Amino acid sequence: MTRKQRRIIGQIGFYLLIGVIFVYLMFPFYWATISALKTENELIRTPATYFPIDLTLQNFMAVLSNERFLRGILNSLIVASTATVLSLLVGSFAGFSLGKMRFRGRSPSLYAILAMTMFPQVAVLAGLYAVIRILSMPSLVSLVLSYLVFTLPFTIWVLTAFFKGLPSSLLQAAQVDGATFMQTFWQVLLPLTAPALVTTGLLAFINAWNEYLFALTFTATDPDAQTVPVAIANLSGRVARQEPVGEIMAAALIVTVPLVVLVLVFQQRIVAGLTAGAVKG
Amino acid sequence: MAQSRIGMAPASRGARKGLRLAAREERMAWLLLLPSVLLLLTVALFPLGRVFYSSFTDARFAAAGSQEVNFVGMRNYRELLSFTLRELPYQVDADGVRRYDHPRLFLRRLDTSMSYDEVVTFDLFGTRYVLGAVRPEFVRSVIDTVIFTVVTVSLETILGMIVALALAAKFFGRNAMRTAMLVPWAIITVVSARIWEWMFRSNRSGFFNSLLDRLGWGDGNTGFLTEPALQLPSIIAIDVWKTTPFMALLLLAGLSVIPKELYEAAEVDGASPIRRFFTITLPLVSPTLAVALVFRTLDALRVFDLFQVVFGERRFSMASFAQYTLVANRDVGLSSAASVVIFLIIFIFAIIYIRALKVDSGD
């Protein structure tokens, strides 16, 4: 075999590998899409069809007129965005303090925050339930508060890293000009960290949108406050024992596609944020 | 600037001013941290303390919430963690075949103060053993979660490395591939659990059964999610699909900082690709790998969504056991004890990790 031939075979093998990876990553998404487009009869047909025969939008229509599901989307939007905004606001103060100021107790604080990003949520489940009862909070508020358990430490950690990366000379220049800490923070540092805020916010939002443990537990007695993951997990048929698979798949796509689009638009920043959050050693 | 604060006596005006500034900075820093500290106290530290306290009580969720709570010491922990490993006795029948005692009945006959139930029966070196526990679901959930963690993290690392190495090369469509990689990651866990649940359906309307049937393997009615032996492998497959891209992304970031010259030099020296991987790539990417590994490990140990959605009450992870005990059984005490055990396992791991990676201490 000549060098050239070997090269060609290597190339073919490489593209084959890429193809396999691509199919592996995308196939379940494809399967969900065609399942959502199949009729009820085709869905239970054996063997399964790999391309839909009778295309229908019936499942999408059914799910979009399902009040519980729509309510879930609204609830998720409210809860996830409130938790995100709150984390960014409070977290950027903390990030500034930890990333740019010198004070005693700084490194223990950093350790504590990092330890909290690895916090098992289930460990506070029963205790949070008790706190919510003591404060007698409405379910949606309780979800916002409980989501801070994971969004806030994560936000602080990533923003601390970003703040630290900003040149200190800016801060000193502002101080020389007689600006107060707050002025420096709002007018100099915050505009510079806007990209970081977008990235961090997006990641916090996705995590909150994804959350299931707290949502399932704290809305157990309040179905009106169910978020999207709980609504999808509980989506069941009007007829007992028959699972509305088509509708579940349609619902899955409806909540996934906007998120995927969002992720694709911000992909470079998300990758940067993920690696900053996770790899910042 | 730092020295002027610590080392020097406040002799000159400048130094005194520096001292005042430093004190002001310190006050300001704590003021900025205060909201975060207060919030984290409310949502994490206080609840955690409460969980710790109620793990020593027999607290339950009562309808009115006015029920008496008693301190029971270590009872919840004893109930959760007591287990026994016994050899299963047998008789040899006329044909020379061993007839083992029924594991469950054998455990019930044991002369102990605890009432053990069967967790698992297994053969090792020609002897059959039975593992019994007072709370077999919890012990099983710990074993299952550990197996789940070890297998998913290993597979994700290997597959993630393959994907990252492939995507590190320059080729047509690389950007499309990097984009495709974010898709499984962006799909929420509950949704991916339900999609795979549907693909794993136990007749030929499910993708895997129809595929196996077409290939002539299996009878087309494999119960991937109902047969105990297939449950863990199936759920592992779902998690690996969902999180391999995350691993690959991190590794890709690690690979991108390795200088190209190293590879060129090695190629000139005639080092094979495999040798190049083990002598250049692996050592240089290993810090990233270590971080990714531990993050994934901690994530896998606290897995909840997948188990809850796919198995409900048929099989538990550690977290889904604690949640089930709390919500369905309303057993706050026992659930809290389980949570404390989970917390300790994960906390010890996190501490080792922070120490090992020497997280920036501010210098």
Image (tube, rainbow, N blue to C red):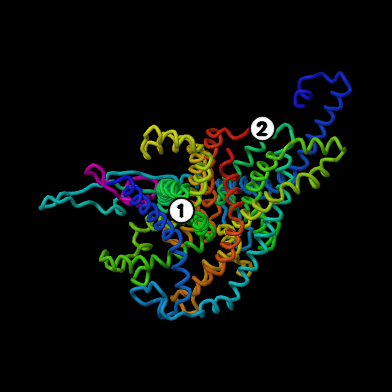
Along the line of sight, the residue nearer the viewer: A165 or A126: A165
* Residue B195 can be seen, yes or no: yes
Q: How crowded is mark 1: few (under 14 residues within 10 Å), some or many (20 or more)?
A: many
Q: Mark 1 points at which residue?
A: B317
Does B234 appear above or below A237?
above
Q: Residues within 10 Å of mark 2 (few under 14, many from 20)?
A: few
**Chain part drawn in magenta:** B107-128
Q: Quadrant of the C terminus of chain B?
A: top right
The kind of residue on which mark 2 rests is Gly
* Residue, far left: B94
So how many labels did they put on this image?
A: 2
- Residue B119 is one of the magenta-drawn residues: yes
Query: Label 2: chain?
Result: B
The kind of residue on which mark 1 rests is Ser
Q: Is residue A172 left or right of residue B136?
A: right
Q: Mark 2 points at which residue?
A: B362
Frontmost of labels 2 and 1 is 2
- Among the 4 quarters of the image, the one containing residue A279: top right
Do tag 2 and tag 1 residues touch (Cβ < 8 Å)?
A: no
Residue A108: x and y, percent?
66, 35
Does B328 appear above or below A69?
above
Q: Is residue B282 left or right of residue B102?
A: right
